Amino acid sequence: MWSLRTALLTTALQTAATNMKGQLSMEYLIISVISLAVISISAFTLLKIKDMADNSYALITLKNDADAIYNAAEDACTMGYGNSRSITLNEAAGMRIWSNGNAIEFSKGNFHLSKNMTCSGEMDVLLGGKITIENQEGKISVGKIG
């Protein structure tokens, strides 16, 4: 009787140990799935942050190019007839610039900027690369070089 009871207990313990191995495997599987989900969400979030930073950098560079064009136009205007300035643009390829009376306006994609100038301008051009800004009889003109 004692040996039958021992045999049944041993068999039960072996079965429980076998089932526990399955239980441990299931727990490791769940932990692995949760870990992969957290890593995936983190990677996706970091990529979104990188895209937003790239867009912000492009907009800041466009604004700097627009400011450089505006400052060169104001310099040419202040210096008088016949003066010109040449500048090289960083990100403004494809930027449209036009005048509206004494206002100079810039646009590219979501970017739009308007500034008032001392002189009036006669321009409507797509920019890129190296440009020249000239004072022609009191009116500012902008053109591409090359």
Image (tube, helix red, strand yellow):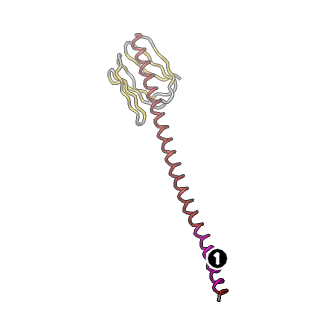
| Local secondary structure at mark 1 | helix
Q: Quadrant of the N terminus?
A: bottom right
Taking the image as shown, residue 41 lies to the left or right of residue 96, namely right
Q: Nearer the viewer, residue 17 or 74?
A: 17
Whole-percent x and y of residue 100?
Answer: 33, 24
Determine the residue located farthest toward the left in the rendered image.
101
Picture quarter containing residue 13? Answer: bottom right
Q: Is residue 6 magenta?
A: yes
Q: Is residue 12 above or below residue 141?
A: below
Taking the image as shown, residue 9 lies to the left or right of residue 126, namely right
Badge 1, how many Cα within 10 Å: few under 14, some, many 20+? few
Q: Nearer the viewer, residue 83 or 20?
A: 20
Magenta span covers which residues?
5-23
Give the residue type that dot 1 points to. Answer: Gln
Q: Is residue 76 magenta?
A: no
Q: Is residue 56 above or below residue 45?
A: above
Taking the image as shown, residue 127 lies to the left or right of residue 122, namely right
Q: Residue at x 57, y 69 (%)?
A: 23
Whole-percent x and y of residue 127?
Answer: 46, 27
Whole-percent x and y of residue 125?
Answer: 43, 27
Q: Residue at x 43, y 11 (%)?
A: 82
Q: Residue at x 65, y 83 (%)?
A: 6
Q: Residue at x 32, y 22 (%)?
A: 101
Picture quarter containing residue 31? Answer: bottom right
Q: Is residue 65 above or below residue 26?
A: above
Determine the main secondary structure of the stretch shown in magenta. helix
For disc 1, the marked residue is 14
Taking the image as shown, residue 34 lies to the left or right of residue 100, namely right
